[in-house]
């Protein structure tokens, strides 16, 4: 019998606004951003690329601890965050520290997080973000809860969260989008599909042709976007936010992107699972190169302006790491105090012993 059925997969085509040459290919989706707003988005992307380069160098010098490189994912990360507001709540994964910084986290605290210092996880009262989630996919369940809380309180804001392609294999991913869908919560779920998770190709993570189509099972809208195209990422995220605020419920956005470096600086070697040809292919799609070409075609960007951003980033990073290095070191007594609100008797005794030792 001839199959006349159409798979849902056929409905998920990649959304693109700028092609690899920085040319508009979809006029209908060009976001309504002023010239200054376009330049600010470019500034943030360039700044984030420099932050990544310097963070890798600081990690290799032993001045930073855990670090997950971000180069290549600037459009996916920064353009999506650019579409939300300060009152929106951010639930990042461990690669999403740049979004936290642009949301208001001081740079020196971001470095303290990398160094494992408790102050790197202490968010200011007016900073709407959680600490970076280390457990893969757990932030999706948290985002559903935060979004539902906003709905109950009548807050005109959304919860925005991120995970990678590997995160979609976790149960928390499905539970989060299903819960948010069932309660029509104002959440935006972004899957940054960089194709390899840690080292496993996406085609071994799932038999689905897209990750966006996983939204169908949860009864929510899903879109696949060119994650190297900042205008497309911004446009779809802005649409998702506006829809959520209008009571339209959550959205799942899959951004097709690529990380140029290793999964983390903790010993991962991407040459064992990626080829040079593949790296070269994705470097041609570089989001900063693409966006630069677009802005230059509109006479909105120049090498001089970019150089100023680079120098400012380097200066900010220099001051921030100096402040992080000088921050008071953690003590064993601090760990004990932070563990419990009311200490058990045995820990009270240990605390007294450590305080006595540390005071000498």
Image: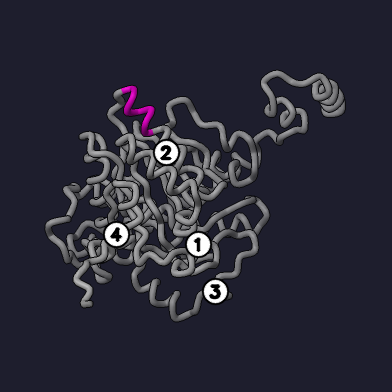
> Which residue corresponds to mark 3?
273
Q: Is residue 160 shown above or below 265? A: above
CB atoms at circles 1 and 3 under 8 Å apart?
no
Residue at 23 percent of width and 60 percent of height: 295
Q: Is residue 151 magenta?
A: yes
Q: Is residue 182 left or right of residue 261?
A: left
Q: Residues within 10 Å of mark 3 (few under 14, many from 20)?
A: few
Q: In this figure, which residue is indicated by the disc labeled 2? A: 143
Image-based side of 212 in relation to 356, left or right:
left
Instruction: State the residue lying farthest toward the front.
Output: 1
Name the front one of labels 2 and 4. Answer: 2
Q: Which residue was labeled with disc 1?
A: 197
N-terminal of the pair, mark 3 or mark 2, is 2
> Residue 343 vs residue 170: left or right?
right
* Residue 53: x %, y % from top left: 51, 59
Q: Position of residue 333 (x, y in %)?
A: 77, 28
**Colour convention:** one colour
Q: Earlier in the sequence, mark 3 or mark 4?
A: 4
Q: CA distance from mark 2 to mark 4?
A: 21 Å
Query: Closer to the observer: label 3 or label 2?
Result: 2
* Mark toward the start of the polypeptide (1 vs 4): 1
Q: Earlier in the sequence, mark 1 or mark 3?
A: 1
Gap between marks 1 and 3 measured at Cα: 11 Å
Residue 360 in sight here = no
Question: What is the span of residues highlighted in magenta in the rendered image?
Answer: 147-153
Q: What residue sits right under mark 4 in the picture?
A: 225
Who's the residue at 33% across and 22% down the image? 153
Helix, strand or loop under label 2: helix
Q: How far from the left and from the top, in percent, is residue 349?
A: 85, 21
> Which comes before the other along the chain, label 2 or label 1?
2
**In this rendering, is residue 204 above or below 344?**
below
């Amino acid at each position: 019998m001839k199959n006349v059925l159409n798979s849902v997969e056929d409905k998920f085509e990649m959304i693109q606004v700028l092609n690899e040459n920085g040319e508009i290919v979809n006029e209908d989706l060009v976001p309504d951003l002023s010239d200054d707003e376009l330049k600010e988005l470019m500034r943030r992307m360039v700044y984030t690329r420099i932050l990544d380069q310097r963070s890798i160098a600081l990690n290799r010098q032993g001045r930073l601890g855990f670090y997950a490189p971000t180069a290549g994912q600037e459009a996916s990360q920064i353009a999506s965050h650019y579409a939300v507001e300060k009152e929106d709540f951010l639930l990042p994964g461990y690669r999403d520290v740049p979004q936290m910084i642009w949301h208001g986290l001081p740079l020196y605290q971001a470095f303290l997080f990398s160094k494992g210092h408790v102050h790197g996880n202490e968010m200011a009262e007016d900073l709407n973000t959680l600490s970076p989630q280390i457990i893969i996919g757990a932030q999706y369940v948290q985002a559903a809860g935060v979004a539902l809380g906003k709905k109950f309180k009548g807050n005109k804001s959304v919860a925005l969260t991120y995970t990678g392609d590997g995160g979609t294999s976790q149960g928390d991913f499905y539970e989060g989008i299903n819960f948010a869908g069932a309660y029509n919560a104002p959440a935006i779920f972004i899957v940054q599909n960089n194709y390899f998770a840690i080292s496993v190709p996406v085609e071994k993570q799932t038999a689905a042709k897209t990750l966006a189509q996983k939204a169908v099972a949860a009864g929510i809208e899903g879109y696949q976007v060119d994650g190297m195209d900042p205008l497309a990422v911004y446009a779809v995220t802005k649409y998702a936010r506006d829809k959520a605020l209008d009571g339209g419920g959550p959205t799942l956005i899959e951004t097709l992107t690529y990380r140029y470096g290793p999964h983390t600086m903790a010993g991962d070697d991407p040459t064992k699972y990626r080829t040079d040809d593949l790296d070269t292919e994705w470097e041609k799609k570089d989001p900063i190169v693409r966006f630069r070409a677009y802005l230059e075609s509109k006479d909105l960007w120049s090498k001089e302006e970019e150089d100023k951003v680079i120098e400012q980033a380097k200066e900010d990073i220099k001051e921030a790491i100096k402040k992080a290095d000088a921050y008071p070191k953690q003590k064993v007594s601090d760990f004990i105090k932070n563990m419990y609100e009311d200490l058990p008797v045995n820990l009270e005794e240990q605390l007294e012993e450590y305080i006595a030792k540390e005071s000498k």
